[in-house]
């Protein structure tokens, strides 16, 4: 039956670890142990691994750790956490694990494939190609967004307010001057702007 094998420590008991098993979340089990334990301090999980048969693995670990077991307290051992993790990994053959101790390498390190490994020169070359492509794309987008007609300055037929003519023919165009604000039509003919009132 699949389940967790975990190593926990108590904040007060230095150099002593607890090796236990659980079919549920080890963190929840740690909270229960903190509230139910006679020991002062908080119980915290430092390592947990998911194994195929957690009961038989727990028995194997307790047998292997027997010489360091605290006599009055089963499941408690005098062990350094880092050493216990490495020994537990050899015995338990975990499917996956979680470790909250610095300096312990991951169980299944992610290896880079040959395609992912690049030299600095290759990285620089790739970055330059991407930059060139971005420049080319931005130039083509700029060309696409250019107006068909060149913008020219025109005057409102009512108030002579000077403004830049919009692109393309417009009907019911409103004078931008807030004093005038009258409507008129603009029609483009061959890049020339003709006012119609």
Image (cartoon, grey):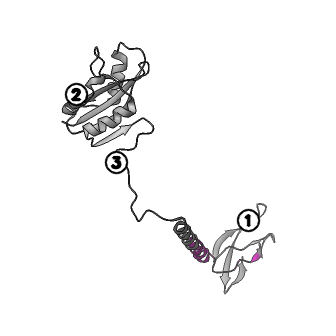
The x, y position of residue 14, in whole percent, is: 43, 21
Any mark on residue 80, and which? none
Q: Identify the residue under disc 1.
A: 176
Dot 1 or dot 2: first in sequence order is: 2
User: For this view, does 35 lie left or right of residue 123?
Assistant: left
Number of numbered markers: 3
Q: CA distance from mark 3 to mark 2?
A: 26 Å
Q: Which residue is the site of mark 3?
A: 108
Q: Is residue 123 above or below residue 29?
A: below
Q: Which of the two labelled residues, at mark 3 and mark 2, occupies the earlier sequence position?
A: 2
Mark 2 falls on what kind of element? helix
Quadrant location of the C terminus in the rendered image: bottom right
Q: Nearer the viewer, mark 1 or mark 3?
A: 3
Near mark 1 (Cα within 10 A), the count class, few <14, some 14-19 or many ≥20, is some
> Does the CB distance between marks 1 and 3 fall below 8 Å?
no
Task: From the viewer's perspective, tell me whether residue 179 is left or right of residue 50.
Answer: right
**Which residue lies under the disc numbered 2?**
63
Against 79, is 183 above or below? below
Name the residue located 22 percent from the left edge and 33 percent from the top edge.
Answer: 57
Q: Is disc 2 surrounded by few (<14), some (14 to 19) or many (20+) residues within 10 Å?
A: few
Q: Which residue is nearer to you in this view: 34 or 101?
A: 101
In the rendered view, does 101 fall on the left or right side of 175?
A: left
The image shows residue 45, relative to residue 160, as above or below, that is above
Please state the horizontal and vertical placement of residue 100, each as a whole percent of the image.
Answer: 41, 35
Q: Secondary structure at mark 1?
A: loop
Task: Identify the secondary structure beneath mark 3.
Answer: loop
| Location of residue 107 by image quarter | top left
177 in magenta: no
**Residue 41, position as x, y percentages in the image:** 43, 17
């Amino acid at each position: 039956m699949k389940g967790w094998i975990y190593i926990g420590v108590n904040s007060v008991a230095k150099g002593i670890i607890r090796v236990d098993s659980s079919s549920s979340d080890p963190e929840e089990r740690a909270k229960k142990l903190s509230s139910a334990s006679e020991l002062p301090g908080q119980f915290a999980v430092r390592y947990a691994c998911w194994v195929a048969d957690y009961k038989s693995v727990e028995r194997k670990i307790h047998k292997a750790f027997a010489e360091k077991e605290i006599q009055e307290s089963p499941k408690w051992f005098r062990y350094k956490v880092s050493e216990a993790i490495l020994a537990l990994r050899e015995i338990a053959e975990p499917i996956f694990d979680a470790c909250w101790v610095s300096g312990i390498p991951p169980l299944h390190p992610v290896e880079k494939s040959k395609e992912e490994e690049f030299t600095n020169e290759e990285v620089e070359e790739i970055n330059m190609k991407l930059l060139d492509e971005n420049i080319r794309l931005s130039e083509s987008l700029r060309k696409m967004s250019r107006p068909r007609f060149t913008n020219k300055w025109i005057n409102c037929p009512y108030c002579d307010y000077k403004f830049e003519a919009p692109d393309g023919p417009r009907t019911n165009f409103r004078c931008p001057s807030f004093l005038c604000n009258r409507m008129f039509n603009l029609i483009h003919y061959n890049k020339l702007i003709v006012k119609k009132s």
